[in-house]
Image (cartoon, helix red, strand yellow):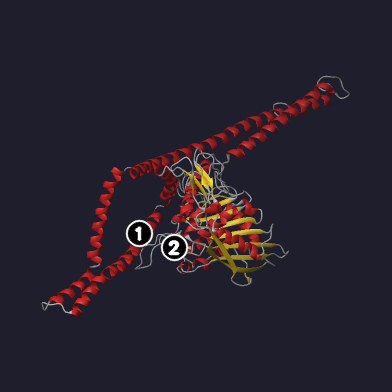
Amino acid sequence: MVSSGAGRGVGPGAGGATGPGGDLLTEVLGPGRSAGGGLAVRGGAGGLVADGREMGAAADALRRVGLSLGERAAEVGLVVARTGLTGAPALDPAGAAAVARALAAAVGAGGAAGTAAACGELAARLALAGAAYEEAERVAQRVVAGVRDGVARAAGGALGALVRRPEVVLPAGAVVLVAVSGASLTWVVVRGGGLLGDLGDRAVGALADGRVDAAERTALVAGTTDLPGELEVLARADAGGAARALAAEASLLAAQHPQLLQHVVAAAPALAGAALPLRAGGTDRGAVWAGGDRGAVWTGGDRGAVSSGGRRGGGASTGGRGAVALPGGDRWAWPPRDVADLAAAVAVVGTQDGALRPTRVDVRAAGPAVPVAPARGTADLLARARPMAGGGALSPGGRATSRAPVHVERVVDAAGARRWVVVLPPTQTTAAPWARATTNPADLGTDVRAVGQVPTAATRAAVTAMQRAGVRPGEPVLLVGYSQGGLTAVQLAADPALRERVTVDAVLTAGAPVGGFDLPPDVAVLSLEHEEDWIASLDGGANPATPAWSTVVRDLPPGATAPAPGEAPDGMAGHGLDHYGETADLVDASDDASLVAWRERAAPYLAAEGTTASAQLFLAERRPVG
């Protein structure tokens, strides 16, 4: 399918080439076709997507029609010859001749036989075009990926060689040591100057009369003893400030160059694989990654197999990679084939919930279900996530909470049919992914695990909440998620085991890096993204542009992400839920065919005459095992 090779905003824009060919290029290579209101749309029911496989199937159908028509024409011609209509005397010679001429026209070059030939020719042309499209996409993807991964492998190889060569590392380490020492000395002088000055003043005062009495001596000793601790307090505060400043600068840079970030993320697996040519513990005997009865042995080579689940391109040969499924749903595949492989490998050693740090999730109802007004549109559905996110990119209150909320809403139409809207939480804590002190399942570790497409505490919490709310098999469910919530929603929809128990009918995401997932064609998806939101680029590629999956990309108006007077620029401003609410309003007002189709799909979950709704909030908390 010519649709997935380019990232957001790469290539010609919506105002570029015109005509069918130009429209297709804009759809495929650019941010998408213009949908008015500053929106660009890729995929969906109104998408211009050339699917080589579908074209091949259509060509085969045309070929069969042509063959059938040809056979019918031959049969009619044989009947004409056998009945003698073409020359035998008849009661009505003129009429017989007219019938013969009509039959000859029907089965001749201008009739069935000609149509059969035209069908055959069109089938051949269509099959060639489909093959050409498929090959063109493969070539384009190979060229882009080859250049990107070639550079990444070269950089990774150089980095790996640096690490493995002591004669290079030691001089470099000496330079770093000198630099760090010089920076430390400068910091002590600048930031610790006040403390040192106070201590110096005490010493000068004590020595002013030429003697140091007991009280002065005690004060000097105390000041000297306390100095390291006071310097440490300053250092910790400054280190935190430096880390925050660095994170803010990195975030701002990413927001200014989201397409570049997308390519950097896509190249990361090749770089990591080249920099760390890992084997199983450096031996051929394998390595135990987790102790006790949860241990799993990685033997490397082709013996391991990784379940692809809902991964795009899943099921391909490991190609000599060490790959294995681990307890807790973790997997290890090295060198990583894609962003999901790399994130899954990081998740093994750097997050909770998996093989090394298993956890359970406790889910309880915050209260009974209460009547609510049904949502009126896409913006209203997304607004259900606002209490979870505080209306911003990351709720300050969310950083302190220990439980993640899951909103489960039952919608009953006038006929009594039940449907469900499930709203999943965004990232709510910035604690380190491996920190056991974090009990909120909506943490950074869940972000890493979700991108790696391995089970998370958030997915388990969502399933438990749906079960306790009373979701029955066969009842349609619409999953809604902003940021990490969108990742969780798509991960649930991609899980074949879950779909056996829960009928995921539709998914709405905002600001979520979900391009690495492959969903069934009967699940309708609408993904909202902003050009200025680098979070959506962390999947390393564009979302699938299929008839069922529409992606709306909006370039925010000038000044929308500008800081307030006196405030520093915020690289996360484009990720704000308030901006996504505005984008959802534009979706509700758009007449783009894909967005109209989405609204029709979502209509049964929305307000209508006789429709009622009730909502129940569940709170999920992670608990360590053992």
For disc 1, the marked residue is 246
Q: Amino acid at mark 2?
A: Ala
Mark with earlier residue (1, 2): 1
Quarter of image, res 213 = bottom left
Q: Position of residue 553 (x, y in %)?
A: 49, 54
Foreground: 167 or 65? 167
Q: CA distance from mark 1 to mark 2?
A: 16 Å
Tell me if residue 39 comes above or below residue 112 in the rendering. Answer: below
Report the residue marked by disc 2.
431
- Crowd rating for badge 2 (residues with CA inside 10 Å; few <14, some 14–19, many 20+): some
Q: Nearer the viewer, residue 439 or 262?
A: 439
The image quadrant of residue 182 is: bottom left
**Quadrant holding the N terminus:** top right
Mark 1 residue element = helix
Q: Is residue 194 left or right of residue 108?
A: left
> From what the image shows, is residue 509 above or below residue 172?
below
- Mark number, residue 53: none
